[in-house]
Amino acid sequence: MKKVIFYISVIELMAIFLASCGGNNKPNPVYKPTPYKIDIPFGFPTKLNIPADNPMTEEGVKLGRYLFYDGRLSGRTDPDSMMSCSTCHIQKNSFEVGINNPRFPGGFPYGITGKPTPHVMLPMINLVWNSNGYLWNGFVSENNPNPNFRNIEDIVRMGVVSDHEMDGDTTRVKQLFQSLPGYPELFFKAFGNETVTFKNIERAIAQFVRTLISANSKFDKYIRGEVQLSQSELQGFVLFTTEQGADCFHCHGGYGNPLFTTNLFYNNGLDSIFTDPADRFGVTGDARDHGAYKAPTLRNIQLTGPYMRDGRFKTLEEVIDFYSSGLIQTPYVNPLMHHINNGGVQLTPQEKYDLISFLKSLRDDDFLTNPKFAKPEKFPDEK
Amino acid sequence: MKYFKKQQLIKLIIAVFVLVALSEASCHKINTPDIVSGKLIFTFEHSVGENSLQIDTMKYVNAAGNPYLVTGIQYFISDICLHKANGDSILLDKWNDIHYVDTDLPETWDYFLKDSIPQDDYSSVSFTFGINAEKNKSLLFVNPPESNMFWPEYLGGGYHYMKLNGKWRDTSGVIRLFNVHIGIGQIYDSTGHITRFVQNFFKVQLSSSAFSIAAGQSVEITLNMDVNEWFESPEIFNFNVWGGGIMQKQVALHIVCLNGHNVFSVKDIKTLIHE
């Protein structure tokens, strides 16, 4: 809260400063952005991961939304070779490509060059509450010694330049947006300068991404006392949060951690050998991290197959079978997977059914259809 | 470097708190309107027996003869209480002053008490391991890392007092995983329904913890947790008997919490003098 007030006053000072510098002859437009307020949903953390040099504003978020959906972010204008964040991050799939995506069969994305991404998608949901590191291995985090890989702003740049995503060029991209009528004005409103910089492109998109908040699933309504869960969903919830049940909560949250992830990294017993250079060990060099990846949020999990960082499971049923009896013991499995002593949590068919009913209660239709997160009707240069 | 920073912090804390009376603070209320005070710092260390804990190496053996390793320990300390020879005592903490220790997070290894300590001679220190029943409610902590310690509502709610995670070698030589997780326990009826909850938090009375504090001084008490003690006395805890998880086994929770009275010892008491 204090932070928010601080940002507001910084913005106001900037506004006053800029206003006072206005020329005498022609009336310059005034730069006065409106702070964007994030309401903390019930039980959610109050600590937000917003860099001090990119306070959220209504104008920044609005611009970010255009850029997020604009295929010209790839630096290209030919309809066949355009790519935007939304090419892969699709709202109705909790901002993943989705398993039934016509462009990416099976839900395996690849870049403009045809090169597959090293891992499958992660959802884009409640990221403003993640301070432990972004991407499957947490490479992008405050702790990265290289300041170019610290936050969502940096992921925007990585998405634009990497050959398994847009394979673009930041200079060409900023020049292109400078030339598109309507955009420079939006950059002024958001950042006080009509000159399009790539930094400001990063900032705007990151601001938009931070607004993508899901806190209105059936389960959320249940914990707020607004609806009742079905008998099966309730049984599933008990299984999810009991050690002698399915024992999921230590890594994937629950009532006391409504993000449904700790945003921490674990080896959950999927493999017998570990050859992926982009696992958590690749980031930390800590022996405990071989084959470890972020435990993804289970919000909207119904829509975000294929599952695991390599998309090995198509359905939730397959995932639950794995946790029930398919675990593979190696020296690197995290101790929180202690049911591996019995091959898994050993669920009955009824228990599996209930657990999946519960997981489905984490679907948030308001989030998946929220018009504020959707593609804008027109881009700024469209009549 | 670390010492220097600590000193500055201490100075700051002293400046802010020197005039604050200890209004809410008492185990048994004492009235001390015009106190001259100092500050108290706890530093946490971890060992197995005599040697400091080495994470992730299978080189320890507990009293039951289980070879084991530790991958990490997280726990809460609260209700620090200072006792005097005349029987008086002061409860130091404010409501929100519950300290979280995590072997993975160095910034949690020092605990700067928010309250000022009245200048006096103290005969001993005690604290609550975990969180007492009054405070241990779900959503007390919404931010990580503390929020990741939540204990499921269905099992009594609130927070894990401790997560001690690792692996042991069973009698046939197989490596198995364990989670010694303690918190509110449950009593089940014959059909498996929970009939009531058991508060397992306990008070640790530290021996050899006498110290004196004068105005403007900071006292730093180094506490050591000997991991072996969780499994040793008064009752032997055997992984081959209890298995990898005990959150729903009140008998096992009870043994671990009994043993917990002896896990902490005072390793060092230092007085840091300022101006």
Image (cartoon, coloured by chain):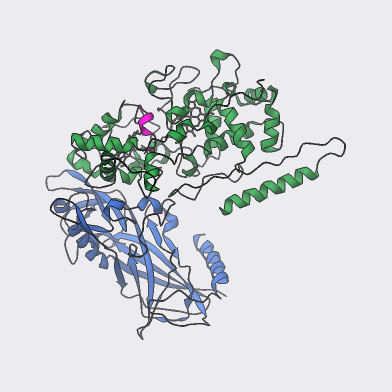
Chain colours: A green, B blue
Give residue A147's position: percent from left, percent from top.
Answer: 55, 40
- Number of numbered discs visible in the structure rendering: 0
Observer-nearest residue: B220 or A84?
A: A84
Q: On screen, A73 above or below A351?
A: above
Left/right placement of residue A326 relative to residue A33 reads left
What is the magenta range? A294-310
Give residue A340's position: percent from left, percent from top.
Answer: 21, 40
What residue do we see at 41% from left, 53% from top? B105
Residue lying furthest bottom: B86
Q: Quadrant of the C terminus of chain A?
A: top right
**What kind of secondary structure does the magenta stretch mostly adopt?**
loop
Check residue A140 for magenta coloring: no
Give residue A96's position: percent from left, percent from top.
Answer: 43, 28
Q: Is residue A264 visible?
A: no
Q: Is residue A324 visible?
A: yes
Q: On screen, B231 above or below B24?
A: above
Give residue B68's position: percent from left, percent from top.
Answer: 22, 51
Observer-nearest residue: A239 or A176?
A: A239
Left/right placement of residue A44 relative to residue A332 reads right
Check residue A299 for magenta coloring: yes
**In the figure, residue B46 lies in which quadrant?**
bottom left
Residue lying furthest front: A227
Observer-nearest residue: A117 or A27?
A: A27
**In the figure, residue A305 lies in which quadrant?**
top left
What residue do we see at 61% from left, 23% from top? A378
